[in-house]
């Protein structure tokens, strides 16, 4: 039998060579240039004959291809299923046609050594205020404070300012949401454009008038439509200091759900626009409306070379405590900073809101009387039934005295005799009348105060930086420097509550479909940025720069700005537009690895045939696993299939593969799991998972290197909303008690797939379908669980669906969540707080741990998370709420969509050598960082049109000479336009950061020398507004752990 098969192999090979040689000869005759020149004398009849023969040969070649496939399968059958290839680690086919991946006994390419995280062991910031400790200290009792309901009575002595007069800086502003109740364009057309048009005229009328502006997305839209005279007038106001651009981001970003990549990207977009069009550099941050504040933001602003910032929406009990201890101004320090290199001066507004009634002092009834837009006859009035009065010579003394009393009381909450008083609200100053009402009346009050020395006050209009500079000057320090005796703080300000037990923890999950879409688009944008930058440099090196389509850059700009707009604190938090789903249906694919490390991974594509094989560019067959595409829980599609291919792909490489029709087919590796009280298992070379025989849900995890089976049980639960008048909505989470177990009458349909590349269990329930998959591959991709939960709760009313992980890990009341995918913030479950107060944002990951294990849940979309008991992690998956929660939106959450929430789950053993001695600081492992990265930056499968004559075919492209260290992340490679010529002189920005671990070696850029060379390498501030001297081409770059740095470079 074996001899017969060997003869078949040899005969088939000889036949293949003979036919293929004849084909090549004919092909050479057809394409020989010399013969082409004499083709005119060749008889047409003979040409027809040759064409027919060529077609016949092509048909024979196709048949021969099929024969070869059969021969190859016969040869493979000769191979013992237990044998391995010469290399010892290559996949091979078993007798039944499936691919087998031998276990790779070598260490994975990501190796974590005990000394890797010495940084994590030793780093601990020295601060006066640690927010976790502050939460432990406070009682959160919400005692009525009198006129300042959430505070206390403030008193002062009249002579306190005799030696040093009170300096009052009134800062006019208008908060403009780029989309909330109205769309971005509707807001601009109805209100925002009028604010700018009035600004140009009204500020110019008096040089003492000041104003601040934050949202560059609106300002850029106005600028592009304004004539030259208006542009010049606006530029003059900015250069003279009457108008200040604060923060200068494309939007005022959300700080709970936004990823730090997007936060940085929208900041760069705004700053680059300001530099190009106005030549101005923001110096101060202004964030009055995000619903809680992340410690990531002060770090990013610091790296952008700003010195000061302001925040507003902080829990009212925190504000009260900080006011009582005069800690409303502090240096905000990162938890890993043992010195003061990350310190950012921060001002916390003390009262309920940023509107006029809550900014002049503690009594809103009085402050409202100084909001002159509310004068009698206006559409806006004061809820306290005491309207403002226009300032006249007859009442100015009395009015100035009343206002000064509020100023003095507010100043008692701060450590200097310099006072900030914001003057504005949402979409204010859109009509000329309000400009006159506010500026004329306040100027009369200021003139009176300043002309009466016995009042010991100097009041004026100001910008935000005017105020901060005055504080620094009063304390005798340089801008951005810690004033004497001012506290140092570390931590963040989540969850936010504005009154009673109304915690804004619902928006962490609201509209998860759009949160997931945002993360996908961010990854695609980053991939496009990198590929574009490399393509431009490649074209420049080849002398083809002029032929590269410059229009592609405008597409990148549009993508940046659209994704930047979505980071707005009323967008990613719960409102957005649907995107168009791209149909990948072409024959050729290019795979792009957007991360900096080599990946061994499984890539999934959809095909229309069950007989498919995948080839590399050099014709090597890649191992694949074919799976069904399911129409329902029990019905397969007969037209669409999933092909999962195993690839090894280096960093930033474009790798071409082709999909070919295969001659043989094999049964799909799927079976139904019947209901059984006994658990069942699936396994890979690294993991064994146990599942409940009745629910089909995960029950346990066992690592290959650990004999112990660890309980990790997945449960689903539902929350309702309270029956009282205050109910859950888009912002608020107000549950009706503890969660109730999810239940349905019918038993779930459970499907099991076990193949060479992956094994998975799919459990179908009425409102969700959960898929738990493990990849049978070496490296990072095979060490964690891939979990997808498809949700559809559109038939529910006032329900929130949650997923809970229940384990035996002794985590106590402590758990850990990330901030913006950048750093980890320890959390603690407080029984003294309501359930909803113990939920926190989870943009990227959360984990629990004890002395033996750490269990980390990674997410591909921002959601809300908590740990309500020891050993548990709970995440809110989706919310459907039928009413508004009275925070201005005016509607519930009823536009739910069928949504896929994607997770990874990693169980790690802990070493006592790697345990920190404090609960106030924690870091992910290198394996953890990489797991989060591969979840959020999957290999992109890009369709390629079939090759056409005269068009160069797509080839594999590898720009990097090697793999970068695994504790290094290149955040972006972003092209920027020259200020002079938009089509040339593009430079590229590299933003980089280290995770928790540090290397002993200097970092060297490993862009291939044969591919590119550096013309410029220059350290920059994070948003490229400030530069340092350029580096030489052979320079090494030293980065501290957790450091984000930016560089301007030019490749050619």
Image: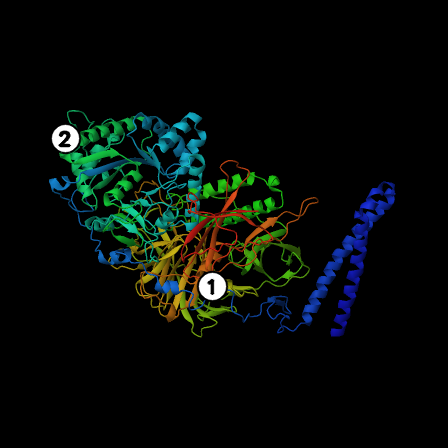
Mark 1 and mark 2 lie on one chain; the one further toward the N terminus is: 2
Q: Which residue is mark 2?
A: 398
Using residue 452 as the reference point, say whether residue 338 is left or right of it. right
Q: Is residue 570 visible?
A: yes
| Label 1 neighbour load within 10 Å: few <14, some 14-19, many 20+ | many
Q: Which residue is mark 1?
A: 784
The count of marks equals 2
Give the x, y percent position of residue 53.
82, 51
The vertical placement of 80 against 657, above or below, is below
Residue at image coords 19%, 31%? 450
Residue that appears at 52% across and 37% down: 982
Q: CA distance from mark 1 to mark 2?
A: 70 Å
Mark sitting on residue 738: none
Residue 833: percent from the left, percent from the top?
25, 56
State whether residue 965 is above or below residue 580.
below
Q: Where residue 953 sits in the image (x, y, percent)?
A: 66, 48
Horizontal and vertical percent for residue 955?
64, 52
Quadrant occupied by the N terminus: bottom right
Tell me the residue at 17%/40% (across/down).
Answer: 164
Q: Is residue 671 above or below residue 279?
A: below
Task: Tell me which corner region of the image, top left, top right, bottom left or bottom right, holds residue 160.
Answer: top left
């Amino acid at each position: 039998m074996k001899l017969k098969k060997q003869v078949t192999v040899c005969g088939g090979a000889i036949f293949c060579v003979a036919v293929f040689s004849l084909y090549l000869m004919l092909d050479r005759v057809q394409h020989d240039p010399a013969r082409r020149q004499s083709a005119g004398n060749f008889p047409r009849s003979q040409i027809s004959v040759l064409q027919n023969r060529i077609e016949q040969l092509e048909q024979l070649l196709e048949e021969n291809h099929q024969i070869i496939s059969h021969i190859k399968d016969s040869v493979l059958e000769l191979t013992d299923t237990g044998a391995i290839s010469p290399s010892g680690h290559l996949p091979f086919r078993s007798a039944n046609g499936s691919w087998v991946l031998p276990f790779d006994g070598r260490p994975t390419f990501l190796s974590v050594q005990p000394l890797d995280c010495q940084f994590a062991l030793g780093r601990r910031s020295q601060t006066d205020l640690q927010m976790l400790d502050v939460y432990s200290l406070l009682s959160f009792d919400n005692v009525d404070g009198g006129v300042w309901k959430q505070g206390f009575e403030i008193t002062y002595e009249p002579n306190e300012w005799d030696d040093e007069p009170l300096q009052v800086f009134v800062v006019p502003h208008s908060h403009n949401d780029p989309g909330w109740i109205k769309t971005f364009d509707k807001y601009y057309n109805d209100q925002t454009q009028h604010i700018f048009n009035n600004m140009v005229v009204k500020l110019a009328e008096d040089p003492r008038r000041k104003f601040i502006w934050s949202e560059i997305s609106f300002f850029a839209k106005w600028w592009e439509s304004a004539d030259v005279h208006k542009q010049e007038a606006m530029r003059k106001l900015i250069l003279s200091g009457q108008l200040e651009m604060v923060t200068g981001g494309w939007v005022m970003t959300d700080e709970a759900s936004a990823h730090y990549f997007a936060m940085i990207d929208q900041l760069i977009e705004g700053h680059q626009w300001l530099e190009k069009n106005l030549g101005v550099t923001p110096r101060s941050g202004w964030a009055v409306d995000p619903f809680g504040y992340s410690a990531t933001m002060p770090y990013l602003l610091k790296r952008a070379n700003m010195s000061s910032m302001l925040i507003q929406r902080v829990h009212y009990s925190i504000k009260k405590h900080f006011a009582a201890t005069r800690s409303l101004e502090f240096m905000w320090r990162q938890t890993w900073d043992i010195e003061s290199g990350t310190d950012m001066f921060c001002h916390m507004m003390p009262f309920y809101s940023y509107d006029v009634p809550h900014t002049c002092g503690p009594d809103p009834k009085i402050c409202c009387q100084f909001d002159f837009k509310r004068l009698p006859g206006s559409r806006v009035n004061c809820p306290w039934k005491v309207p403002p009065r226009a300032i006249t010579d007859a009442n100015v003394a009395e009015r100035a005295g009343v206002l000064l009393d509020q100023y003095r009381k507010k100043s008692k909450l701060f450590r200097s005799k310099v006072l900030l008083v914001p003057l504005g609200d949402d979409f204010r100053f859109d009509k000329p009348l309000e400009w006159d009402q506010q500026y004329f009346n306040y100027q009369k009050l200021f003139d009176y105060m300043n002309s009466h020395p016995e009042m010991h006050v100097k009041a004026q209009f100001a910008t935000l930086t005017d105020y901060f500079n005055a504080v620094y000057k009063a304390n005798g320090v340089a801008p951005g420097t810690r004033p004497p005796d001012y506290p140092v703080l570390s931590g963040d300000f989540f969850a936010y509550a504005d009154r009673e037990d109304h915690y804004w923890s619902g928006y962490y999950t609201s509209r998860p479909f759009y949160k997931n879409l945002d993360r996908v688009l961010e990854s695609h944008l980053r991939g496009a940025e990198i590929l574009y930058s490399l393509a431009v440099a490649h074209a420049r090196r080849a002398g083809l720069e002029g032929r590269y389509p410059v229009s592609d850059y405008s597409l990148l700009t549009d993508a940046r700005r659209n994704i930047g707009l979505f980071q707005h604190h009323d967008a990613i938090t719960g409102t957005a537009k649907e995107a168009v789903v791209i149909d990948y249906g072409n024959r050729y694919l290019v795979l792009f690895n957007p991360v900096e490390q080599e990946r061994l991974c499984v890539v999934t594509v959809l095909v229309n045939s069950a007989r498919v094989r995948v080839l590399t560019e050099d014709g090597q067959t890649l191992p694949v696993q074919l799976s069904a595409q399911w129409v329902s829980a029990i019905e397969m599609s007969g037209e669409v299939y999933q092909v999962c291919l195993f690839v090894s792909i280096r960093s930033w490489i474009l790798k071409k593969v082709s999909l070919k029709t295969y001659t043989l087919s094999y049964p799909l590796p799927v079976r139904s799991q019947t209901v059984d009280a006994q658990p069942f298992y699936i396994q890979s070379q690294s993991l064994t998972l146990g599942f409940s025989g009745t629910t089909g849900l995960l029950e346990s995890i066992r690592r290959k290197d650990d004999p112990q089976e660890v309980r990790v049980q997945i449960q689903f639960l539902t929350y309702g909303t309270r029956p009282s008048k205050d109910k859950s909505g888009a912002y608020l989470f107000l549950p009706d008690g503890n969660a109730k177990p999810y239940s349905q009458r019918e038993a779930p349909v459970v499907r099991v797939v076990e193949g060479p590349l992956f094994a998975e269990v799919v459990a179908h329930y009425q409102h969700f379908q959960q898929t738990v998959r493990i990849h049978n591959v070496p490296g990072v991709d095979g060490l964690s669980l891939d979990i997808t939960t498809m949700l559809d709760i559109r038939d529910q009313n006032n329900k929130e669906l949650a997923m809970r992980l229940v384990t035996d890990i002794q985590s106590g009341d402590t758990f850990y969540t990330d901030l913006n995918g950048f750093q980890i913030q320890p959390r603690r479950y407080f029984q003294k707080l309501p359930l909803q107060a113990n939920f926190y944002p989870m943009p990227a990951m959360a984990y629990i741990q004890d002395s033996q294990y750490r269990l980390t849940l990674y997410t591909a979309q921002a959601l809300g998370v908590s740990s309500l008991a020891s050993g548990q992690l709970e995440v809110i998956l989706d919310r459907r709420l039928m009413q508004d929660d009275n925070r201005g939106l005016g509607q519930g959450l009823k536009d739910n969509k069928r949504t896929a929430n994607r997770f990874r789950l990693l169980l790690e053993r802990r070493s006592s050598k790697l345990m920190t001695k404090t609960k106030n600081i924690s870091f992910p492992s290198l394996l953890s960082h990489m797991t989060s990265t591969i979840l959020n930056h999957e290999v992109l499968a890009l369709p390629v049109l079939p090759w056409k004559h005269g068009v160069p075919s797509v080839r594999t492209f590898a720009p990097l000479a090697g793999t970068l260290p695994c504790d290094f992340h290149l955040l972006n490679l972003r092209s920027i336009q020259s200020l002079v010529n938009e089509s040339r002189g593009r430079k590229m920005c590299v933003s980089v950061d280290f995770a928790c671990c540090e290397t002993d070696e200097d970092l060297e850029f490993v862009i291939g020398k044969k591919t590119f060379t550096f013309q410029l390498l220059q350290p920059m501030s994070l948003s490229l507004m400030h530069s340092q001297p350029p580096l030489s081409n052979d320079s090494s770059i030293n980065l501290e752990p957790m450091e984000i740095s930016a560089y301007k470079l030019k490749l050619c």
